[in-house]
Structures are given as structure tokens and as C-alpha cells.
């Protein structure tokens, strides 16, 4: 039998959102961009795995959804710059969360800056922070100091991982594709 509070939360309809734009799909979920209550929002929606028994699939998916939300909440409390969770719909396996303004993965940032820094040393007019869907960092960096922005980004990523580990959160899929840059003013 399910817990009464869990059932009540599942029965609530999802909040009103604008049109959905599919940003991508991974092995576990689809990522959509939308607006919710006039805020840029990401919806991470887990989908069924056809090769698993439906009951097992639902149980695993709900467990993973709960774990992800708990981890994001834990790292935010530890001071890591993680996206704010706006809403969770367990019935539809959806997490509604803050959209990172620049939407640039560390992978893309490293690719872009490596190709430009190898041909010339460029300077950026903005600084950036490393963010990840389950562990983020808010240290600012600026390439105007002459430091390679790729080195700064990787250093920030390491600090973010250390903060998450200090909060007893292990990411499980540490790749530059799972960390995002948050653009901030200098």
C-alpha cells in the first residue's frame, strides 16, 4: 500500500506550463524547455523502458526520481549551485526545475574555448559558473586574467564535485555533458 501523502501528491495535476520544446533525450529521460509561472523551466521526464516489466519499471523510475530530487536538494543545502526544484509529479515521472540561463554544457564550453584558445587568446566579457543537474558550483571565473578558461572551468567542476561529495552525494555519471555553465555578469 502506498503512503497517503505520496498518493495525494501524485493525484495533483501538473502546473500550467507553456509549450514544450524538446531539448534532448538520454537513456533515462527526455528534457523539455518551457515557461512555468513566467519562469524559464526545464522538465525532466523519465520514460518507460519497454524491456522491463511495467511494475518493476514504475518502481525503479519512481525510486530514481525521488533519489535525484533528494540529491539536488541536499547539494543545494550544502551551498552547491544546483537548479531550484519547482515541482515534482511522481505519477508522470517529471521534475520541473530552474532552467540554467546560458544552457551551455561544460563539454560545449571546452570545445568552443579550446578551438579559440589554440588559435588566439580570447577574452570574455562575462564570467561563468559551473552547474550540473545534480551538483553545481557558483564560483565565478573570468578569462580576462590571462588564465585559460578551460582550466578555470575544470577547476570549478572539481570544486563542485568535492562539495557534492562533502554533502555525501555521489553523482554516478560525471561527464562534462552533465555540467552546465551559468552566465553571470563580471
Image: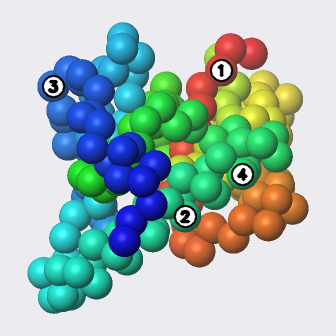
* Spatial CA span between label 1 and label 2: 29 Å
Residue 155, horizontal then vertical, whole percent: 80, 53
Q: Which mark is residue 118?
A: none
* Left-right relation of 54 to 61: left
Residue holding disc 4: 74
* Left-right relation of 29 to 69: left
Q: Which mark is residue 67?
A: 2
The first of marks 3 and 1 along the sequence is 3
* Spatial CA span between label 2 and label 4: 10 Å
* Spatial CA span between label 3 and label 1: 27 Å
Q: Residue at x 47, y 32 (%)?
A: 86
Are discs 3 and 4 less than 8 Å apart at CB?
no
Where disc 2 sits, the SS reads: helix
Q: Observer-nearest residue: 2 or 94?
A: 2
The first of marks 1 and 2 along the sequence is 2
Residue 78, horizontal then vertical, whole percent: 82, 46
Where disc 3 sits, the SS reads: loop
Residue holding disc 3: 19
Above or below, 36 relative to 108: above
Q: Residue at x 73, y 50 (%)?
A: 75
Q: Which mark is residue 184?
A: 1
* Spatial CA span between label 3 and label 4: 30 Å
The first of marks 2 and 3 along the sequence is 3
Amino acid at each position: 500500500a502506498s503512503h497517503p501523502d505520496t498518493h495525494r501528491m501524485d493525484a495533483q495535476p501538473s502546473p500550467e506550463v507553456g509549450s514544450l520544446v524538446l531539448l534532448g533525450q538520454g537513456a533515462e529521460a527526455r528534457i523539455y524547455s518551457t515557461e512555468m509561472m513566467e519562469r524559464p523551466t526545464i522538465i525532466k521526464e523519465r520514460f518507460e523502458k519497454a524491456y522491463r516489466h511495467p511494475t518493476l519499471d514504475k518502481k525503479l523510475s519512481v525510486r530514481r526520481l525521488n533519489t535525484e530530487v533528494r540529491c539536488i536538494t541536499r547539494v543545494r543545502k550544502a551551498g552547491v549551485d544546483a537548479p531550484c526544484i519547482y515541482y515534482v509529479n511522481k505519477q508522470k515521472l517529471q521534475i520541473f526545475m530552474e532552467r540554467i540561463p546560458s544552457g551551455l554544457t561544460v563539454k560545449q564550453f571546452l570545445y568552443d574555448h579550446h578551438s579559440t584558445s589554440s588559435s588566439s587568446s580570447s577574452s570574455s566579457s562575462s564570467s561563468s559558473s559551473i552547474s550540473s543537474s545534480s551538483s553545481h558550483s557558483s564560483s565565478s571565473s573570468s578569462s580576462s586574467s590571462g588564465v585559460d578558461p578551460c582550466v578555470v572551468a575544470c577547476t570549478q567542476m572539481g570544486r563542485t564535485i568535492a562539495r557534492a561529495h562533502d554533502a555525501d552525494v555521489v553523482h554516478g555519471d560525471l561527464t562534462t555533458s552533465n555540467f552546465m555553465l551559468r552566465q553571470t555578469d563580471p
